Image: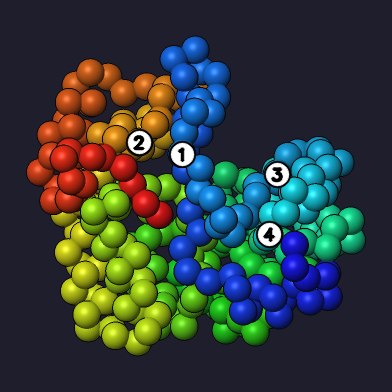
Amino acid sequence: MNYRRREAKDYARQHFKGIWAAALTPFEPNLALDEAVEELGAHRTIMSCSDQNLDTVIDLAKHAQAIGADYIVVHAPVLHFSHEQDDTLYQYYRTISEQVEIGIALWSHPDSGYLMSPELCARVADIPNVVAIKYSVPRDMYARLTRLAGDKILVSTASEEEWFDNIVELGWRLYLCSSPPYLLQTKADRRMREYTDLALRGEIARAKAVRDSLDPVRAALRRTRPAEKFHAHSKCWQELLGQTAGAVRRPLLELTLAERDATRRAFESCGLRLGARGERSSAA
């Protein structure tokens, strides 16, 4: 880590840019972690440090800092009460912040059972080493937070389909996501990275043309993804790209043979270019 707690916001403003992706965990057939996969090498990293036990979150955060992570991301916890929720969440992130020097990204999403308001996020953004948020909320909410506190916190949302518009209309420079870069790209076809770079350079018309060229891929993913099977479907798509994926862990549901076949046929007609000599591998 190349900065101290009070320097975290300035460091993030300079270095926390572009696409930050999270791949699905690869498993062997017995659901052991498949560690015999390619490594990223000298890339910047953001580590997930989330748990319902606050002591565990702090332990994970200290470990991430000790092994050289650039930042951590901490989910908003599930709260089983509704009174004084904002003060509880502020103190939650403040407590974590005081235990580490590392920059913290918030993550607010519906799975927590609530959404942090833009006003609360702006308040939490006053904490010195809170540097960003993955804000999985409707657009009017994240646009409001950008207006309220865009000078204090880097705002992002998970949707790839909104990324281009958010660069152009909201001036965003950071995309905190999960699997889209591993589903929409290959080593030979990096249009997502291409339209991002063009948009960030201000070449908007060219960027939009490249962004729009991926619509058949997006449509193929959407129409073949069964309800409640996001992870299994994404892993199936990754395997079609030649990536290591494996099964999902219970209680998550696997695809049926018919669903896998439909996904394969959609993949083969979506227009993603594969590498030379049939090589299938993605690059984020």
Vertical order, 175 against 199 (above or below) = above
| Res. 71 mark | 4
Left or right relative to 164: residue 158: right
Residue on which the image places disc 1: 38
Mark 1–mark 4 distance (CA, rounded to whole Å)? 22 Å
Cβ atoms at labels 2 and 4 below 8 Å apart: no
- Report whether residue 115 is seen: no
Give the residue at x 34% y 79%.
Answer: 199
Element assignment for label 4:
strand
Which is in the foreground here, disc 2 or disc 1?
1
Q: Horizontally, is 74 left or right of 4 in the view?
A: left
Number of marks = 4
Q: Is residue 182 visible?
A: yes
For mark 2, what is the residue?
A: 243
For disc 3, the marked residue is 50
Q: Which residue type carries mark 4?
A: Tyr
Residue 283: percent from left, percent from top:
37, 51
Looking at this rendering, what residue extends furthest in the bottom direction?
202
Query: What residue lies at 83% left-to-right and 70% top-to-bottom?
Result: 4
Q: Nearer the viewer, residue 183 or 87?
A: 183
Mark 1, other Cα within 10 Å: few <14 / some 14–19 / many ≥20: few
- Label 3 vs label 1, nearer the camera: 1
Among the two numbered marks 1 and 4 on one chain, the one whose residue lies closer to the N terminus: 1
**Is there a contact, CB below 8 Å, between mark 2 and mark 3?**
no
Q: Earlier in the sequence, mark 3 or mark 4?
A: 3
Marks 2,1: beta carbons within 8 A: no
Residue 180 has which mark?
none
